[in-house]
Image: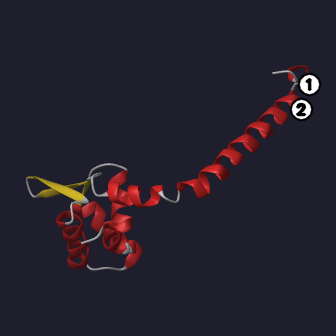
Amino acid sequence: MHAFDILGDPRRRRILELLADGEQTSGAITDVIRAEFGLSQPAVSQHLRVLRDSGFASVRTEGARRFYTVEPEPLTEVDAWLDRFRRFWEQRLDALETELARGRRAARTQADPSAKGT
């Protein structure tokens, strides 16, 4: 399955967002997804299986609990595809950084007029 097919589903994207914050139990993931999307536990389990089978997530078992972790390798395909488009926003981010620096400098100057040259 293509990476964008996996990421096209908002529930799977949300699961990956949760896993990006660190390892999560299947129960914790299920609680969040059920609350946000109104899915049943079997439906959440199916999404976890798709993520696992496609390599986006891995699972380890500890007793009766299953711990899921995000796997970064499939995201390289997404990153490579996005690489063609970065030039469209990198210039704007650089310009934003310049404006933020100007704003900080102006705020320092207003707070301490003697800091004008710093």
- Circle 1/circle 2 CB separation < 8 Å: yes
Relative to residue 63, is residue 115 depicted above or below?
A: above
Q: Residues within 10 Å of mark 2 (few under 14, many from 20)?
A: few
Residue in view at x 24 percent, y 72 percent: 1
**Which labelled disc corresponds to residue 113?**
1
User: Quadrant location of the C terminus?
Assistant: top right
The image position of residue 2, as x and y in percent, is 28, 70
Instruction: Indicate the amino acid at tag 2.
Output: Gln
Relative to residue 103, is residue 91 depicted above or below?
A: below
**Farthest residue toward the left?**
63
Location of residue 81 (image quadrant)? bottom left
Q: Which residue corresponds to mark 2? A: 110
Answer left or right for 59 relative to 69: left
Label 1, secondary structure: give it.
helix
The image position of residue 97, as x and y in percent, is 68, 42
The image position of residue 108, as x and y in percent, is 82, 30
Location of residue 40 (image quadrant)? bottom left
**Farthest residue toward the front?**
84
Relative to residue 6, is residue 38 depicted above or below?
A: below
Instruction: Indicate the amino acid at tag 1.
Output: Pro
Q: Residues within 10 Å of mark 1 (few under 14, many from 20)?
A: few
Residue in view at x 36 percent, y 72 percent: 11
The image position of residue 52, as x and y in percent, is 19, 63
Answer left or right for 65 relative to 116: left
Q: Nearer the viewer, residue 5 or 42?
A: 5
Residue in view at x 57 percent, y 54 percent: 87
Label 2, secondary structure: give it.
helix
**Which labelled disc corresponds to residue 24?**
none
Residue in view at x 74 percent, y 37 percent: 101
Answer left or right for 44 relative to 36: left
**Farthest residue toward the right?**
113
Q: CA distance from mark 1 to mark 2?
A: 6 Å
